[in-house]
Amino acid sequence: MEQAAESTPSGAARPGGEFFAAPTEVNHRRYEALRAYLFEGASAAQAAARFGYTPAALTSLARDFRAGRTDFFAATKPGPKSAPTKDAARGRIIELRQAGRSAHEIAAVLAEEGTPLNRTGVAEVLAEEGFPRLWPRPHAERGLSRREPPTRTKVVDFTDLPESSETKLAGLLLAIPDLVALDLPGLVGAAGYPGTRVIPALNSVLSLLALKLTATRRVSHVEDIAADPGAALFAGLTSLPKATALTSYSYRLSHDKQRAFLTALDQATLAAGLADGEALNLDFHAVMHWGDDAVLEKHYVPRRSQRTRSVLTFFVEDAATHNLLYANADLGKATQNTEILAFADHWKQVTGTDPKRLIFDSKVTTQTQLGELTDRGIGFITLRARNPTLTAHLHALPPSAWTALTVARAGGKTRKVKVHENPAATLSAYPGTVRQLAIAGLGHDEPTILITNDTDTPIKNIIEAYARRMNIEQRLAEAIRSFGLDALAGAVPLNVDHDVVLTVLAHTVCNALRRRLPGYATATPDTLQRRFLSTGGQILNRGNEITVRLDRRTYSPVLRQAHLPDTEVPWWDGRTLHYEFT
């Protein structure tokens, strides 16, 4: 006889039904909460309480669902199926959010409780659980423990320096030989940077440079490393100054002083072989502002594909060595077109002659300034904007008018292109004619148009030289990633003009350091920071010698083979820096 179908009293759950009443998986819980609210008719408060949401979070989930931004039945994706650290902290994160804590505050509590999860991980859990974003509150309202205030900063007295100190930043002192080789005290003196009653100018610059080299994103985060003996000794101080002191100091430095510092730095860079100056890549970079009340002009920010309030900066890179040589944030719309001429004046002051070749895109300057470059005997390579007339003319050319070429690409690869040369092209506002190259086959729908006043260099070399201009965009990406170039806070707490100069200095120091590390000739600054500059260790005070004993790490064999000379450090009263390994 056929077994009778299982039956239950009306409204009673069958065995296994508890799975639907108490869902644990994130998407399942969202589904049941939205079903109760949107289909079963429960109020927002009832459905939220039943499934562990706040009414506001449930309303946010419903809004996203109606907008089609929620997919409960997505196909299984490749990759890890679990995140043990997140899962272990998930319950506590939900509990703290329901108590009104922001992601930043929750991360701080988790760190104190011994179950650390960074702010990004906390924010991801909160997003998965459907909680809306909550901005951090003032510190006094958070109920979190506060760090002990650091002792008053002053120049270090080596007679009071302990015989042995543990530091997380012993690797930061690897940069000192390069700073001494560049004669940083002389650079600061040439710039005329002022000191304060307590902290000399050199120590203030070293304090700010320490933030760059340790990837401390904002000057307001100086507390993260201020009391570390390695960072303090690097700057020749008992501790790094507070954020307010560093901010105030940066605003005492005029643009004339920044320009004088860069002049001295570039001379030292050329003398050290860190640049050759034959060809220079130029580019603008807009540092986006995040506040609401800044009196700033609007500039195009590529990352946002929009014009928004930002600080316009200008950078120059040596094409051969990829070292940054120049930066300026003292710019506005009225002066940005002439910044290329200002740099040419700077380079003449550095070397005694105008630059030989400048390479840049079409938006750096205007045709009028191109004429001035030619009058001064300065070579240039740049793009020409396409227009319908020019495009139609190129399309009408016979195949015989194009020359096939093979040009080099990054990584040793090559690309086959076709080139049409016009040796005497005219521009609307440029006096005379320019050499124009139309290049097809670079991956664009229409040919790329290059113009130059260089009439002698072979076509292939012109194209490859312009292709290497893209390296400056890589340098800017490195500066954003490693030196906090885009970390412009709402209140603009650091003089941006000084900040970009420090970025050039930090980049130069990293380039000098990597030359002393075997196998790291092309390493990016963030790699150096992660593998070497963040190495912990001990500082040993041995009278006239300060020994840095570096902890053993995966990359210690590289340091053992590196050139780490004993160095007499001027801001340590002539004491010698010596390295050892555990």
Image: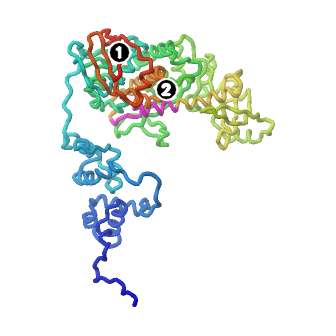
Where 428 sits versus 257, above or below? below
Magenta-drawn stretch, dominant element (helix, strand or loop): helix
Q: Which mark is residue 495?
A: none
**x and y, in percent, of residue 223 in the image:** 27, 30
* Disc 2: CA contacts within 10 A as few (<14), some (14-19) or many (>=20): some
> In the rendered view, does 229 fall on the left or right side of 81?
left
**x and y, in percent, of residue 401 in the image:** 79, 35
Number of marks in the rendered image:
2
Q: Amino acid at mark 2?
A: Tyr
Where 190 sits versus 430, above or below? above
State the residue in front, 127 or 540: 540
Identify the image's colour scheme: rainbow, by chain, secondary structure or one colour: rainbow
Q: Residue at x 31, y 55 (%)?
A: 131
Marks 2 and 1 sit apart, C-alpha to C-alpha, by: 22 Å
Residue 187 makes an appearance in the image: no
Q: Secondary structure at mark 1?
A: strand
> In the rendered view, does 185 fall on the left or right side of 521?
left
Q: Quadrant of the C terminus?
A: top left
State the extent of the magenta-drawn residues as a range: 473-490
Q: Residue furthest front?
A: 1
Q: Which residue is mark 2?
A: 520
Q: Amino acid at mark 1?
A: His
Sequence-first disc among 2 and 1? 2
Place residue 423 in its image quadrant. Answer: top right
Q: Which residue is mark 1?
A: 578
Q: Quadrant of the N terminus?
A: bottom left
Q: Are marks 2 and 1 in contact (CB under 8 Å)?
A: no
